[in-house]
């Protein structure tokens, strides 16, 4: 493993401008980033594909590359894989297509996706079928543009659809596309009582992204290395043992990091360089 595999996310820079984020993480020493499509950093919707040229200029200025993109999705956002109603589904499909096209133009090969969510007043199978259909449509679109759609499991508080490895495996089978890939979120895997090694055993090279964070049992948020109680070197050892060549998205989202996000990513950088 090397430091270029670790990509800080702009989520905790949401009260800063996008250039502040890129200048900060580049100055720390990172060369890879994950771009979260919040409106004031990189706006994408069903009718607009974002200001690509502005992003390219910033990437060149700060010697960075985007290795993954995280479009806003799932509850309470309207665009998600299990969206209901013909108009909303059409808008959802165009939204993700615009994200995929933006990723291609920015040289990014990975887009993070989730399964979406069901209404509690409908059968789970109905929402599942919509999710499979939309994910399949977008994977077939992605196949033409060299982009992988990497789905992660979510907690039961976020969705009833893809919570565990077996749900993700079923989704992979039903979608049946080479563009379908997997994200391992180590906090979600831990909370589900699952084993990361099983993800490698089942998905192999389809595991292309990791959401890498510390965690604490009493805190729902994703924490920076050292702020939780996880055995972070042990998690890294599993990736190392499996010859993992994908990317680690540093997905920290606790509100404590919002005022000084650069300080958080600098501390993480130091921990990484001591352990990889």
Image (cartoon, rainbow, N blue to C red):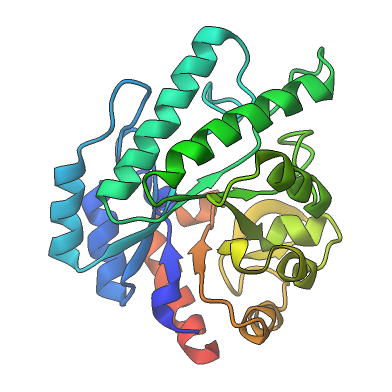
Left or right, 64 with reference to 114 = left
Residue 70: image location, x then y, percent: 46, 46
Residue name at image x 22 percent, y 62 percent: 23
Answer left or right for 154 relative to 136.
Answer: right
Pick the front one: 143 or 188: 143
Residue 79 in the image: state x and y as whole percent: 52, 25
Residue 2 location, quadrant: bottom left
Residue at 59%, 35% in the rendered image? 136
Of residues 237 and 257, the one nearer the viewer is 237
Q: Is residue 195 left or right of residue 129?
A: right
Q: Is residue 24 above or below residue 45?
A: below
Figure check: 102 above or below 181: above
Q: Residue at x 80, y 50 (%)?
A: 164
Q: Is residue 113 above or below residue 148?
A: above
For the residue pair 66 and 230, the one nearer the viewer reads as 66
x, y (%) of residue 200? Answer: 71, 70
Q: Is residue 211 found left or right of 7 in the rendered image?
A: right
| Residue 54 occupies quadrant | top left
- Counting from the top left corner in percent of width and height, residue 88 is at 52, 13
Q: Looking at the image, which residue is at 50% across and 62% down? A: 249
The furthest residue to the bottom: 274
Q: In this figure, what is the number of numbered marks?
A: 0
Do we see residue 96 in this rendering? yes
> Does any portion of residue 210 appear in the rendered image?
no
Residue 38 vs 231, above or below: the answer is above
């Amino acid at each position: 493993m090397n430091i270029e595999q670790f990509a800080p996310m702009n989520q905790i820079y949401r009260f800063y401008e996008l250039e502040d984020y890129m200048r900060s993480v580049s100055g720390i020493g990172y060369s890879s980033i994950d771009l979260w499509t919040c409106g004031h950093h990189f706006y994408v919707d069903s009718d607009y594909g974002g200001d690509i040229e502005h992003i390219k200029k910033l990437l060149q200025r700060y010697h960075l590359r985007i290795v993954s993109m995280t479009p806003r999705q799932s509850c309470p956002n309207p665009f998600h894989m299990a969206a209901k109603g013909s108009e909303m589904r059409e808008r959802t499909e165009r939204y993700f297509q615009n994200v995929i096209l933006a990723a291609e133009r920015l040289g990014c090969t990975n887009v993070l996706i989730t399964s979406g969510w069901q209404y509690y007043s409908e059968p789970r199978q109905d929402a599942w079928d919509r999710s499979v259909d939309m994910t399949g449509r977008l994977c077939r679109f992605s196949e033409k543009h060299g982009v992988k759609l990497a789905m992660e499991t979510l907690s039961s508080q976020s969705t009833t659809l893809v919570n565990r490895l077996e749900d993700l495996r079923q989704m992979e089978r039903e979608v049946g596309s080479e563009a379908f890939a997997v994200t391992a979120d180590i906090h979600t895997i831990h909370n589900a009582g699952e084993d990361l090694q099983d993800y490698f055993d089942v998905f192999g090279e389809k595991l292309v992204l990791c959401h890498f964070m510390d965690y604490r049992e009493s805190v729902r948020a994703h924490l920076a290395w050292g702020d939780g109680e996880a055995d972070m070197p042990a998690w890294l050892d599993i990736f190392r043992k499996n010859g993992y060549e994908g990317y680690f998205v540093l997905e920290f989202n606790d509100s404590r990091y919002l005022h000084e996000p650069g300080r958080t990513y600098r501390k993480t950088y130091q921990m990484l360089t001591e352990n990889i």
